[in-house]
Amino acid sequence: MAEVDKKKLKLYSFWISSCSFRVRIALNLKALQYQYIPVDLFKGEQLTPEFTEVNPTEYVPALVDGDVVVSDSLAILMYLEDKYPQHPLLPSNLHKRAINYQAANIVSSSIQPLQLFGHKSVKEKFGTHEELSFNRYHIGKGFEALEKLLKDHAGRYATGDEVFLADLFLAPQIYSAIKWCNVDMVQFPLLARLNDAYKGLPSFQDAMPEKQPDAPPSGAS
Amino acid sequence: MASVTIFRKLNRFQKRTFSFKTIEARWTEMTSPYTQKPSVRNFSEGVAAAESSSNLILYSFWQSSCSWRVRFALNLKGLPYEYRAVNLSKGEQHTPEFEKINPLRYVPVLVDGDVIISDSYAISLFLEEKYPQRPLLPTDPRRRTVNLQVASIISSSIQPLHMLSVLKHIEDRFGAEERLLWAHTYMEKGFLALEKVLEDFDGRYATGEEVYMADVFLAPQVAMATERFKIDMSKFPRLGRIYESLKTLPEFQAASPQRQPDAVH
């Protein structure tokens, strides 16, 4: 593991993890400096004593802020929002907030956990072909729902003309869908347009997997 | 402002009467989910019906643990609602009418006037923000974060992995034994994580002496784990103890599957 740095915030992250990607975007948006501590999920580093001593849940990402340790990306984002209110991740309008919560949860409960390549045991037992069709099914279902949820609310970004919580969940999921599951975004025009918009934002681009310190040189898995 | 001025002009007797009425009115509101049977329509009747006079409508299935969470939360906040059953066993979630309500075809869905919200986590946060009585999140930042964390671990790292549709997929492809192993693996992994997250807290419930969002998500999850999947909770003593406390709450019991209008006995 990396040596302790004087920077206050530490993020235990894996370059390719879309949950880690969400938090990296938030930290960039809020202009929060942090120490990046890689945890290689493919090598099982989340199970090592060094990591579990810091974060017993073994989940990545995990944020350490002084003596506070938070895992689970949605909880981390809500924690950051409460403690560091600059560049708010949620609008003030109640209905718009609810749209953001829904979009975030569609991704975090109905798409991402059902991406079986995140489950090492599945890859080992069942093989790549099996997981791809399952993954694509759930992405398709989730993306269709997101298209309908956001169509009356989207502006330049998912819920208006400012970046909010929904965008932090959409960007990594769309990235993952295109890169790993060859999803054709033509079927999802709103999400495709949002994805293009995210390409113009440094806070999103700097959080991309390939730009992380633990990304392999070629950027391939 | 005007009402405060009027109040100050009342004599002592009148002030007492006014206060009594207010307490009585509030008590009725608080107990209404238990003293009144929720108005029930099956799904197709609900769709055809005129706009309900009740503010809140909950699309729910009696056995859905996600619906259970929201029923529990509504009861805790003393919010009456119209129950609209969506029979998942009969595939009512696939009707065009329900797909308009929730394109993902999942329950629960909450309708509040012209606002429609799906996903139990999103619904919980919406209820907390719009109806702040009987808070589901503490103000203390550390406990607040833990509650959000526990609820999120349950709703994204545990429950989705044992959804019936996922288990059916695993069984269809790889057999019944693999299905059981899959369900147990992810549930126990999640429960172990929750034991760790909650280990610094003492008290009757997850994060102390008050019921919060962590409890709202935990109780139906443990109920599901023990009743449907026969998980041995002795491996998770803290969660087991918390569940035993939550089980006794009238708000939880009124929300339980067997007490729902669409329950099949």
Image (cartoon, rainbow, N blue to C red):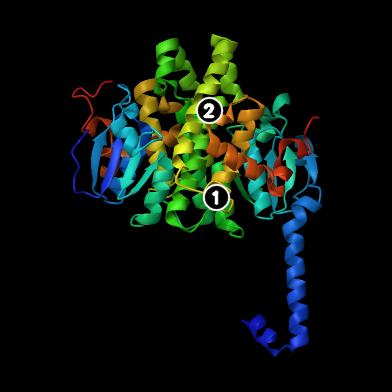
The amino acid beneath tag 1 is Gly
Q: Does B224 sit above or below residue B23?
A: above
Which amino acid, by three-letter code, is at mark 2?
Met
Pointer 2 residue: B187
A45 sits left or right of B138 in the view: left
Label 2 neighbour load within 10 Å: few <14, some 14-19, many 20+: many
Q: Quadrant of the C terminus of chain A?
A: top left
Q: Is residue B244 visible?
A: yes
> Residue drawn at (52%, 19%), measured in percent from left and top?
B182
To which quarter of the image does residue A34 belong? top left
Q: Earlier in the sequence, mark 2 or mark 1?
A: 2
Report the side of A199 relative to A122 (left or right). Answer: left
As measured in the structure, the alpha-carbon distance from the residue carrying label 2 to the one carrying label 1 is: 24 Å
Q: Quadrant of residue A53?
A: top left
User: Residue B11 placed where, x, y %?
Assistant: 74, 89
Which dot marks residue B203? 1
> Mark number for residue B175?
none
Mark 1 lies on a secondary structure that is: loop
Q: Quadrant of the N terminus of chain A?
A: top left
Residue B239 image offset from top left, x and y in percent: 55, 38
Protein chain holding label 2? B
Residue that appears at 59% across and 26% down: B231
Q: Residues within 10 Å of mark 1 (few under 14, many from 20)?
A: few
Q: From this view, report whether residue B220 is shown above or below residue B56.
A: above
**Are the numbered discs 2 and 1 placed on the same chain, yes or no?**
yes
Q: Tag 2, which secondary structure?
A: helix
Closer to the camera, B32 or B220?
B220
Where residue B41 appears, as percent x and y from the top left, is: 79, 40
Q: Is residue B51 above or below residue A195?
A: below
At 74% from the left and 87% from the top, the residue drawn is B12
